[in-house]
Image: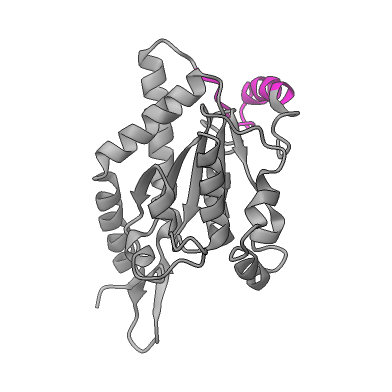
């Protein structure tokens, strides 16, 4: 029998093929991000649990835009209490704490990541962002999300709230690989596929801007001879406006 790692590789390759077939959604997202940057807007990113990895994926990253504000709340990550974070992300009203003090505007973009799309915090954050006129882009697992009910009093799931939805083509429960003799599946796919989609959108955005003769502010690798000096200029420019920087 083919070994597990090669079977997982084939699963990932097929899901990447499906994910990148969303050409119109990828291009529309990139166009919106390009407009945001041209108008000196902010790109907000947010996810809970393992989805917070996606909120960090394009922040302070070599080849990544400078004008990114990740919403990083330790209580919703995994390093303090993973099990408690699962409970907090279900609490209605918690999102208001996350956006307190943010001056959200119509020119801003919110990237919200949630595999299930059913929990209250990302749903409320989407609703609040839209209330201020910002565009909301969600990367989620439509198969999973459509199979569950919302944990928000509105009855809505994230894909029903977002302005633009990209599917990560994940399995229900995220893990995708069956191994004989083992109950349940292994090999989650949501982070791999969603990160690839997100980076693809950023690449397409840069190309749109370049075609207009616009050179966006992009971080270089700090581990090159010239990158650190350039990055320091961006850090000094944006440190006050981007606390995690």
- Residue name at image x 44 percent, y 23 percent: 35
Residue 84 visible to the viewer: yes
- In this orientation, which residue lies closer to the viewer: 132 or 171? 132
Closer to the camera, 19 or 111? 111
User: In which image quadrant can residue 76 be found?
Assistant: bottom right
Residue at 35% in and 48% down: 166
* Residue 219 lies within the magenta run: yes
- Of all residues shown, which one is farthest toward the top? 213
In the image, taking residue 133 as reference, residue 182 lies left or right, namely left
Question: Could one spot residue 58 in this view of the protein?
Answer: no
Q: Which residues are magenta?
A: 216-237
The residue shown at (31%, 33%) is 27
- In the rendered image of this protein, does residue 80 appear above or below residue 210? below
- Residue 20: percent from the left, percent from the top? 28, 45
User: x, y (%) of residue 89?
Assistant: 60, 63
Identify the residue at image location x=71%, y=43%.
Answer: 100
From the image, which quarter does the N terminus lie in?
Answer: bottom left
Q: Could you tell me how many numbered marks the image carries?
A: 0
Q: Position of residue 219 (x, y in %)?
A: 58, 27
């Amino acid at each position: 029998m083919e070994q597990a790692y090669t079977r997982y590789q084939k699963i990932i390759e097929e899901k990447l093929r499906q994910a990148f077939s969303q050409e119109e959604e990828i291009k529309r997202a990139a166009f919106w991000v390009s407009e945001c940057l041209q108008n000196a807007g902010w790109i907000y990113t947010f996810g809970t649990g393992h989805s917070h990895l996606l909120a960090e994926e394009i922040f302070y990253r070599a080849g990544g835009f400078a004008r990114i504000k990740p919403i990083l709340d330790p209580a919703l990550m995994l390093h303090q209490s993973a099990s408690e974070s699962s409970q907090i992300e279900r609490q209605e009203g918690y999102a208001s704490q996350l956006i307190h003090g943010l001056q959200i505007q119509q020119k801003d973009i919110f990237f919200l990541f949630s595999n299930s799309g059913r929990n209250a915090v990302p749903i409320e954050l989407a609703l609040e962002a839209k209330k201020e006129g910002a565009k909301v882009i969600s990367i989620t697992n439509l198969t999973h999300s459509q199979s569950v009910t919302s944990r928000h009093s509105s009855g809505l799931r994230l894909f029903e709230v977002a302005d633009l939805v990209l599917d990560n083509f994940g399995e229900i429960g995220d893990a995708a690989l069956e191994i004989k003799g083992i109950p349940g599946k292994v090999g989650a796919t949501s982070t791999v596929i969603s990160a690839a989609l997100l980076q693809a959108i950023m690449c397409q955005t840069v190309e749109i801007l370049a075609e207009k003769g616009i050179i966006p502010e992009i971080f270089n690798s700090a581990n090159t001879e010239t990158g650190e000096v350039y990055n320091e200029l961006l850090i000094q420019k944006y440190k006050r406006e981007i606390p995690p920087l």
